[in-house]
Amino acid sequence: MVDRPTLTNQDRLDLFTTMVLIRTYEEAILREYHADKSPGFDIGAGLVPGEMHLSAGQEPVAAGIGAHLTADDALTATHRPHHVAIAHGIDLNAMTAEIFGRETGLGRGRGGHMHLFDPATHFSCSGIIAEGLPPALGQAFAFQRAGTDRVAVAVTGEGAANQGAFHESLNLAALWKLPVVFVVEDNDWGISVSRSASTAIASNAERAASYGMPGVRVEDNSVEGVWEAVGEAVGRARAGDGPSLIEVHTLRLWGHFEGDAQGYRSDLEGVPGRDPIPTYRDRLLQTGVLTEGDVSAIEIDASHRVEEAIAFAKASPTPDPADALAFVFAEGARA
């Protein structure tokens, strides 16, 4: 029996600090992404061309997960990866340089924001739906065979819970009792399709029972609820008790991608009032965990770190066109 973790005021302060850093980063990327795409939005223009998926509103998921992992644990994410990458301790300079397509990036500027790979923190992500689950299984299997207490966490979206890879991964994880935690971010929308129009059950956490593992749904985008659920699941995995499934009812504040007009959303009017950061800040202020001075210091530090990363990326060199095949294809790498 794994003991349930106990949340301290320092833990609450750390959760809020992580959430603020993530939002500050996403707001800066939003600014830089749109800076040179006007007056008409041109997705292929600017310093950061292509699609951009930002995670504003989903910070509680990332903060609650990151609090229980070390750099030795593995974490896989989706096409919307920045929040969980930051919470897992990925280097901000290297990640930002990758987003800007620079030679100093995690993938030498070849991968972009949907394909971030960081061996130092065992982090990876992919633009393919549900793709992160099988790699997490592989890492969990390796941890198990090596006799360590390391764990793997696979973060995916509620739309991915209807993919074959999701069910195959849960089945194999349970069969082999792997040290892996599956976390589903339910932001209500699979691009423009509502959850109610795509999924037959109210909670994907109910699917855990089919594979003989615990299933928990965290409501209200609660960062403390995520912290508790993930802490218990990670504890089970480290103790050799196998996998768990957690679904978090979170929130997508912005569009599926930048440039998404969101005409399909009927809930937009109430979205700003559900922003988890001011909600949690006010709660911590009321309970005395935070002071206004603390909030200001946290925001200033986050801004400094983020702007430093943006400046680093902009000052970094772009890849040499002559090296277009290098580090991508085997023949190019040998050349």
Image (cartoon, grey):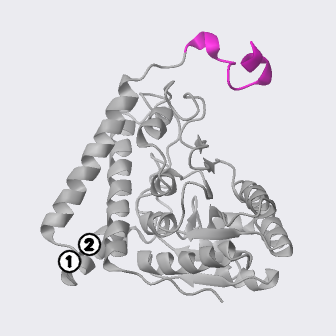
Work out whether residue 32 can be spotted: yes
* Residue 285 coordinates in the image, percent (x, y): 20, 77
Label 2 sits on a secondary structure element that is helix
CA neighbours of label 1 inside 10 A, class few (<14), some (14 to 19), many (20+): some
Residue at 80%, 74% in the rendered image: 177
| Residue occupying the far top of the picture | 322
- The Cα–Cα distance between marks 1 and 2, rounded to whole angstroms, is 6 Å
- Residue located beneath label 2 in the image: 281
Q: Position of residue 112 (x, y in %)?
A: 55, 36
> Mark 1 near mark 2, Cβ–Cβ under 8 Å?
yes
- Residue 96 position (above or below residue 132): above
Name which residue type carries label 2: Arg
**Residue 308: numbered disc:** none
Left/right placement of residue 138 relative to residue 23 reads right
Q: Give the image quarter of residue 270.
A: bottom left
The stretch of residues the image draws in magenta is 320-335
Residue corresponding to mark 1: 285
Q: Is residue 182 magenta?
A: no
SS at circle 1: helix
Amino acid type indicated by mark 1: Leu
